Image (cartoon, helix red, strand yellow):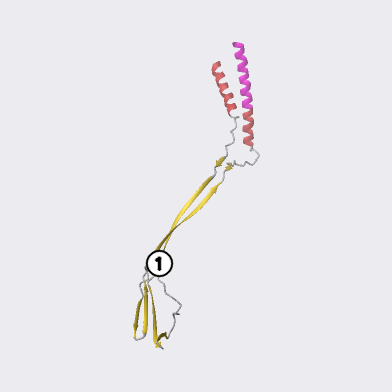
Amino acid sequence: MKQFIFFISLFFVSLVQVSCLHRKPSEPVIIENTKEVLTIVKDTIFRTEADSTYYNAFIECINGKPVFRSSEISENESIQRDKSYKGLLPPKVSLVNGNLSVQCYNQAQEFFKTWRETYTKEHEQTPIYIEKPIYKAQPLLWFQQTQLWLGRIFLALLALFALVLIIRWKRIV
């Protein structure tokens, strides 16, 4: 019976000591220097509709030289055609009884264009502390005060009881 009481008192004393431990503050979370590269591929289609143009002029010969009545094209202008451009058909030119007519047709086309956009984000190493809750001091209620005082009285009686047991244990042994 004496051993049982001794172990129970030892259990309560160790329980009281364990409740007095405090927790260590948490370590800060550290984000290392990182570099994030984001590449976005974009595309689009350029469409041109079929188109045509027409030019008509009357040509007269004055002193053996041809002269245009409506001179929309100057003599210095030259029409150049790019060989890689496949949409423009060769012009149809006809000269009938001094009347010059030029017809030019352009086919409908679609051009597909793709490009890349690259964005770079750099993150620096910064410690982030986890915020602890902020407690506001409020007065205890009457039943909380009562519980505190009853707990103190119980611990004092328990310590006194343990002291008496230890003294009796030493007398017997």
| Quadrant housing residue 24 | top right
Name, please, the residue furthest toward the front.
64
Determine whether the residue tagged by mark 1 lies in a helix, strand or loop. Answer: strand
Main SS class of the magenta portion in the image: helix
Identify which residue is drawn at 63% across, 15% down: 167
Estimate the x, y position of residue 114 in percent, counting from the top left: 43, 59
Position of 89 relative to 167 (above/below): below
Q: Which residues are magenta?
A: 153-173
* Quadrant that contains the C terminus: top right
On the image, the x and y values in percent for residue 163 come to 63, 19
Q: Circle 1 sits on which residue?
A: 47
Q: Does the magenta portion include 156?
A: yes
Q: Quadrant of residue 168?
A: top right
Which residue is more in the foreground, 81 or 63? 63
Assess whether residue 40 is covered by the magenta stretch.
no
Count of labels in the image = 1
The residue furthest bottom is: 63
Three-letter amino acid code at disc 1?
Arg
Along the viewing direction, whichever of 30 and 98 lies nearer the viewer: 98
Relative to 57, 158 lies left or right: right
The residue located at (61%, 16%) in the rendering is 166
- Which sits in the foreground, 12 or 107? 107
Q: Is residue 130 above or below residue 152?
A: below
- Near mark 1 (Cα within 10 A), the count class, few <14, some 14-19 or many ≥20, is few
